[in-house]
Image (cartoon, rainbow, N blue to C red):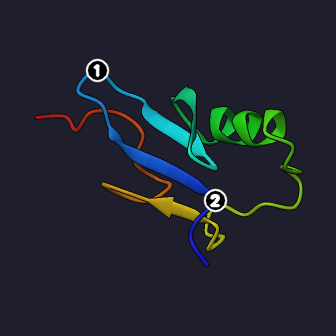
Amino acid sequence: MDARVVVHPPSPTGGRRVRVDGQSLGLAYGPADLLEFLRRAGLDPEQVRLDDPMIEWRGGGPDIWGAEAD
């Protein structure tokens, strides 16, 4: 099964683009933002874990949100 949620790599200015079922929902700056996007997409944030296989993390996992510090 393909991931329903794709969290893209951090942007140079921080934050990660989030897509659900192919639709861009915006830029998340942390787990709370991601869970809010999932809620707006009709998913129950109480039932979703950040390591859930329906979430595809690109460019780092759920602990990476901002641009890497030099």
Q: Secondary structure at mark 2?
A: loop
Looking at the image, the residue that sits furthest to the front is: 22
Q: Quadrant of residue 32?
A: top right
* Vertical position of residue 69 compared to residue 13: above or below: below
Q: Which quadrant would residue 9 be assigned to in this image? A: top left
Q: Which residue is mark 2?
A: 4
Image location of residue 24, percent across then percent down:
55, 33
Q: Quadrant of residue 60?
A: bottom left
Q: Earlier in the sequence, mark 2 or mark 1?
A: 2
The residue located at (64%, 50%) in the rendering is 21
- So how many labels did they put on this image? 2
Whole-percent x, y for residue 53 in the image: 61, 74
Q: Quadrant of the C terminus?
A: top left
Q: Residues within 10 Å of mark 2 (few under 14, many from 20)?
A: some
- For label 1, count other residues whose C-alpha is less than 10 Å away and answer few (under 14), some (14-19) or many (20+): few
Residue 50 shown left or right of residue 29 in the figure: right
Q: Disc 2 residue type?
A: Arg
Residue 8 percent location from the top left of the image: 40, 45
Q: What residue lies at 45% left-to-right and 59% top-to-bottom?
A: 57
Q: Residue furthest top?
A: 13
Q: Nearer the viewer, mark 2 or mark 1?
A: 2
Q: Furthest-left residue in view? A: 70
Residue at 75% of width from left, 43% of height from top? Answer: 38
Q: Is residue 8 left or right of residue 27?
A: left
Which amino acid is tagged 1? Thr
**How far across and how far down the image is residue 37, in percent?**
71, 35
Q: Secondary structure at mark 1?
A: loop
Residue designated by label 1? 13
Q: Quadrant of the N terminus?
A: bottom right
Q: Nearer the viewer, residue 25 or 60?
A: 25
Question: Closer to the camera, 2 or 27?
Answer: 2
